[in-house]
Image (cartoon, rainbow, N blue to C red):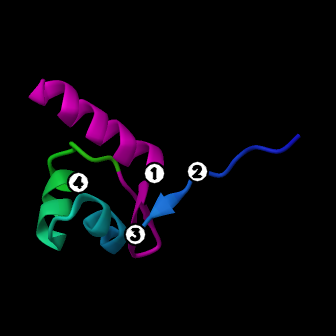
Amino acid sequence: MTTATPELLTVPEVMARLRVGRWTVYDLIRSRRLVSITVGRCRRIPADALRDFITRELEEAA
């Protein structure tokens, strides 16, 4: 039995997908609007967390 490993995105990858700056991504993380984990000294954002964030933002905008 295998379990799928979630895709982890770097801050620059999230920046590119959202088309925002580095500080905006870190502000979203700090405010807990975007879930992230720390691996060593690196910050990683699960792809599912990014999708959830986008979905929540779209629902709030509607």
Query: What residue is shown at x 12% (from left), y 23% (from top)?
Result: 62
Mark 2: amino acid: Pro
Dots 3, 2 in contact, CB < 8 A: no
Q: Looking at the image, tell me whether mark 1 or mark 2 is earlier in sequence order.
A: 2
Mark 4 or 1, which is nearer the eye?
Answer: 1
Give percent across and percent down for residue 34.
27, 47
Dots 1, 2 in contact, CB < 8 A: yes
Dots 4, 1 in contact, CB < 8 A: no
Q: Looking at the image, tell me whether mark 4 or mark 2 is earlier in sequence order.
A: 2
The part of the image, by quadrant, that contains residue 23 is: bottom left
Query: What residue is shown at x 22% (from left), y 44% (from top)?
Result: 32
Q: Nearer the viewer, residue 9 or 36?
A: 9
**Cα separation between marks 4 and 2:** 18 Å
Q: Residue furthest right?
A: 1
Per the image, the residue denoted by label 3 is 10
Highlighted magenta segment, given as a residue range: 36-62
**Cα separation between marks 3 and 2:** 13 Å
Per the image, the residue denoted by label 2 is 6
